[in-house]
Image (cartoon, rainbow, N blue to C red):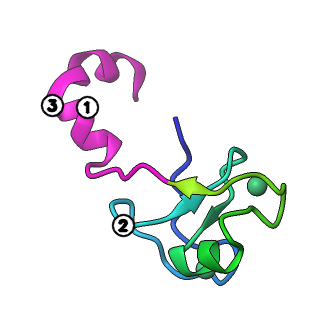
């Protein structure tokens, strides 16, 4: 599962899960302002920065909606 980092790795601006953020293939995460400043190129790996898919519900909420029984077997 994609790691949803909660802050920009450049300026530490808070990033909400459903809000806009940019990531590279190594999951370096930046706020839209920094991504624009870097011209959509990751300063760490020189890879493309692309818009991060937003996540509207927590894994727990997803579990409740469909996979609850299965997850209850795995989770303590
Ligand atoms: Zn930033
Ligand atoms: Zn990178």
Whole-percent x and y of residue 50? 57, 54
Nearer the camera: disc 2 or disc 3: 2
Q: Measured along the vertical axis of the image, is residue 61 above or below residue 73?
A: below
Q: Which residue is mark 2?
A: 19
Residue 45 image-quadrant placement: bottom right
As helix, strand or loop, the secondary structure at mark 3 comes to helix
Would you say 75 lies left or right of 65 here? right
The residues bearing labels 2 and 1 have C-alpha atoms spaced at a distance of: 22 Å
Whole-percent x and y of residue 49? 64, 57
Would you say 76 lies left or right of 23 here? left
Q: Measured along the vertical axis of the image, is residue 8 above or below residue 50?
A: below
Verify CB contact (< 8 Å) between mark 1 and mark 3: yes
Q: Quadrant of the C terminus?
A: top left
As helix, strand or loop, the secondary structure at mark 1 comes to helix
Nearer the camera: disc 2 or disc 1: 2
Quarter of the rendered structure image containing ligand 1:
bottom right
Q: Callout 3 environment at 10 Å: few (<14), some (14 to 19), or many (20+)?
A: few
The residues bearing labels 2 and 3 have C-alpha atoms spaced at a distance of: 22 Å
Sequence-first tag of 2 and 1: 2
Would you say 44 lies left or right of 66 here? right
Residue 44 image-quadrant placement: bottom right
Q: Which residue is mark 3?
A: 65
Was residue 32 drawn as part of the magenta stretch in this picture?
Answer: no
Residue shown at 38%/60% (left/top)? Answer: 17
As helix, strand or loop, the secondary structure at mark 2 comes to loop
Q: Mainly helix, strand or loop, the magenta region?
A: helix
Q: Which residues are magenta?
A: 52-76
> Which mark identifies residue 63?
1
> Which mark identifies residue 71?
none
């Amino acid at each position: 599962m994609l790691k949803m980092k909660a802050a920009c790795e450049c300026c530490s601006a808070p990033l909400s899960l459903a809000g806009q953020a940019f990531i590279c293939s190594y999951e370096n995460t930046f706020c839209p302002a920094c991504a624009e400043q870097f011209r959509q190129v990751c300063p760490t790996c020189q890879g493309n920065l692309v818009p991060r898919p937003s996540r509207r519900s927590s894994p727990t909420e997803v579990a409740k909606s469909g996979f609850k029984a299965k997850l209850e077997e795995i989770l303590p």
